[in-house]
Amino acid sequence: MQKYDIIVVGAGHAGCEAAAAGANLGSRVLLITMNMLNMAQMSCNPSMGGIAKGQIVREIDALGGYSGIVTDKTMIQFRMLNRSKGPAMWSPRAQNDRVLFSVEWRSMLEQTKNVDFWQDSVLGIVVKNGRIAGVKTGLGIEFKCKAVVLANGTFLNGLIHIGEKQFSGGRMGDGSSKNLTENLTDLGFLASRMKTGTPVRVDGRSLNFKKMEEQPGDTIPGKFSYTNTPLLRTQRSCWLTYTSGQVHDILRTGFDRSPMFSGRIKGRGPRYCPSIEDKIDRFASKERHQLFIEPEGWDTVEYYVNGFSSSLPEEVQFKALRLVKGFEKAKFFRPGYAIEYDYFPPDQLNFSLETRLVENLYFAGQINGTTGYEEAAAQGLMAGINAHLKLHNEKEFILKRSDAYIGVLIDDLINKGTEEPYRMFTSRAEYRILLRQDNADQRLTKLSRSIGLASKERSETVEKKYRKVDGFLKYLKEYSIQPAQISSLLSENKTNQLQQKQKASLLLLRPQVTLKELIAHISDIQIFAGDNDLLEDDIIEEVELIIKYESYIGKEQELVDKLANLENYELSGEFDYAKLESLSHEAREKLNRVKPRTIGQASRISGVSPADLSVLIVHLGR
């Protein structure tokens, strides 16, 4: 039996990115999954991206991951969310063809050198002298390896709930993973339970879309990948409808049989994606809730009812949903359900996502308490990278909070842990003006290239793009516009006329004036842009954002630089904080558990106060 460098357990979004990253860096990878037909399965909604999640997908792509490419190739709709707000909030979102998404992921992995596949369950890991030596499978095979990435999703002792019914499963139609949790807890890991859920699926032929509000994609759809992926030419619409008081009353008739309210479900559910019964219980005064009706693909009649996640008895779900406008004659493919599963609190990990208890063992995805394809894929990518680097005695690859949303995600998980499914939001990132969706390539591709993941071609493309951006910025800061040149545009846009000539960059500070309009109205700018190949949408958008938000970007970068001093105060991983009696009891306990590497990391641990930080700094001075 061949010995592998890295074995990845689980072929969800985390596992697939981990396998791709490790293999593309040069490691021999074995990807083990219980069902090869469901690789990178969209178990819940058929979409990628969204608020903050879209930024993560772009970051994965900039680093050399596959999620953005697969998303672009299987999109059926694209929308840039939050356009009415500042660019730090803009978030790309795609509706995808569920089946094609999985097929495309498998195809890309099959074309990736160094990746092998095995269909089986993993019952446990093999550890020798505190270090990974292999895995044991359900077929009784022991595969030897140097590192393991566990990306088990919701499969660890997964239990599905529908009303008073419950049965074993990692998702509907798939079995759960047995024995692995017990194997890990026997090694000293702490495990707990979480819960998530999914809505009913319906037959679109039975819906009356005339009673709903159409939600079309963007007129000019964008994409996620910085590579040359195809542009979306046609799109499918989503639809919006609402629940009502009558719908809520029907749902309440099933509360006595709800596994959530009866206590049969022990795990905590996602705060920001609650079930419909949880919504009407927690927000009893609200008369209605939004339901987004989303197509599952190009050539299917199946629709996903976003907003109607439920574990109530199926007859209650169906009866209530038929009272929603447009659903009067609805036919159902399957009910919504809740799923409980094991996870391992992430404060048991290092920043590389390697476990502290077992060397060369990495956790990625929902096993760490996160929710969402994007969060899982990001962790898988980082775990795959770091497993490879560790095996080749290279420095671990860690992204700071000021580098990427991925850095925020992992920093939050390690420092704060989580007792409920963790979901990324723009509000979690204190440097979100720097971490925009448009500049992920500028922030991250050079870093990825330095470890050998991003290709030379990709790196050169980014360098070429930002040479163009810098050249255009320089020109606009130097070019002066005469009042007569711009008078008609300013009148049209209802903004004050120029009294004297003004630099183009200063004129662009007005919210009423866009760079595309300047290019169209000022022949000199149009000629310069055309001659220098600057008329691409991404170049124009990047230049305009930098000009309009330059002062905000500068202030935020200044803050990053000041706070970086805290990150430079290093702490010993061996120090016993119990000896520092000047620290609060809680701080001593949490510092000993987390073992922060710097004062900056210690400052972000829940329960460590500014007074505790002062004690640490004084101790370092001594």
Image: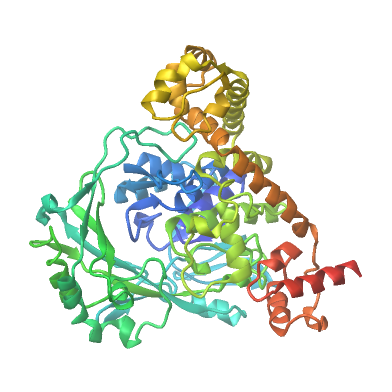
Q: Residue at x 57, y 35 (%)?
A: 546
- Quadrant occupied by the N terminus: bottom right
Q: Residue at x 32, y 48 (%)?
A: 95
Asked whether residue 506 appears in the rendered view, the answer is yes
| The one of 190 and 126 positioned closer to us in this rendering | 190
| The one of 34 and 526 positioned closer to us in this rendering | 526
| 219 vs 396: above or below | above
Q: Quadrant of residue 466?
A: top right
Residue 552, image x, y percentages: 60, 44
The outermost residue toward the left is: 329
- Does residue 240 appear left or right of residue 519 in this picture? left
Residue 84, image x, y percentages: 40, 44
Residue 532, image x, y percentages: 55, 16
| 232 vs 106: above or below | above
Number of marks in the image? 0
Q: Quadrant of residue 289?
A: bottom left
Q: Residue at x 61, y 71 (%)?
A: 347
Q: Residue at x 18, y 60 (%)?
A: 202
Colouring scheme, one of rainbow, by chain, secondary structure, one colour: rainbow
- Quadrant occupied by the C terminus: bottom right
| The one of 131 and 230 positioned closer to us in this rendering | 230
| 430 vs 441: above or below | below
Asked whether residue 15 appears in the rendered view, the answer is no
- Does residue 94 appear left or right of residue 423 in this picture? left
- Does residue 265 appear left or right of residue 359 in this picture? left
Residue 183, image x, y percentages: 54, 78
